[in-house]
Image: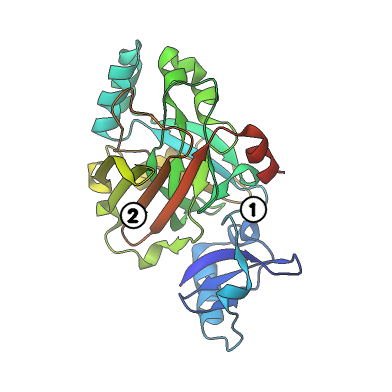
Amino acid sequence: MELVRWRRPDGTTKVGLHDGEHLRELPFPTMAEVLQHRVADIRQAIDDAASSEHRLDPGEVELLVPIDGRTEVWGAGVTYQHSRTARAEESGFEKVYLEVYDADRPELFFKSAAWRVLTDGDPGGLRPDCTDSVCEPELALVLNRHAEIVGALVCNDLTARSIEAVNPIYLPQAKVFPGSCLLSTSIVPWWTIRNPEDLLITMTVYRGREAVFSGEATTSCMRRGYDELVHWLFQGEQFPDGVVLSTGTGIVPPLGQGLRPGDRATITIDQVGALSNVMTDDRGMLEGLLT
């Protein structure tokens, strides 16, 4: 069972479960309200809904971005050795990245509000003022307001790499722009994932029919544990409608091999799901999707 949001033909939105064949509604109007509850209460609501005889055909609805309301997306940076090395190579400020990798406090940054997030099949955004943009495939934790892990998503943390490389202070411009935050449609309950500390993440970028880049990493290579990242995120923040925390990437394309408009990036994470998006620099189209 996976947590999803959907829109009916009449425009109404619902939150519920997807078992691969059917949808079942949960007794919450929004995903934000789901994330206001403790994990034990969410699990009970899921168990109750799973036994319901009232079912919907997924073909009759449109699956939506899995978060809403005041839920935010945050990111963690330099959590993998490969990311540490790549950031040091591409920047003239390598000491910043080398030190944060070993520091007690992790790098955490705001990525997106729920209304700015796009999902599987939507376009990914490229900044026209950036010469080298990259996908950053990441496991994302879905956290409730009580700092408990509810589930997991696939995240593509699109990054304007050449902007961040000029100066780390430009990080917000490199991370936050239309179409920069992409999440898979289904939240996989955390308690159903076997050994989440060792999940395989893969990514392939296609240019037409040609695969121009492919890479893989495992979450076992993360420098920091999930509980550690969650602890630091909630140290100075509160999230009344929960938060998604993307945990960093271990897959970094070589310098100069960034994305072009029309490229398609496909990301998969074992037991969590898949995410596929075609890149565009058409800002008008992206802003139209986000209004």
Residue 1 image-quadrant placement: bottom left
Q: Position of residue 138 (x, y in %)?
A: 38, 44
Q: Secondary structure at mark 2?
A: strand
Residue 86 image-quadrant placement: top left
The residue that label 1 is drawn on is: 68
Q: Is residue 219 above or below residue 23?
A: above
Q: Position of residue 13 (x, y in %)?
A: 69, 65
Q: Is residue 199 left or right of residue 191?
A: left
Query: Is residue 18 visible to us here?
Result: yes
Q: Residue at x 49, y 39 (%)?
A: 279
User: For the C terminus, which image quadrant?
Assistant: top right
Given contact means CB atoms under 8 Å apart, are the residues at marks 1 and 2 in contact? no
Q: Is residue 151 above or below residue 251?
A: below
Work out how far the residue at label 1 is from the one at label 2, CA to CA, in angstroms.
Answer: 23 Å
The residue that label 2 is drawn on is: 269
Q: Residues within 10 Å of mark 2 (few under 14, many from 20)?
A: many
Look at label 1 and name its amino acid.
Asp
Look at label 2 and name its amino acid.
Ile
Residue 87 image-quadrant placement: top left
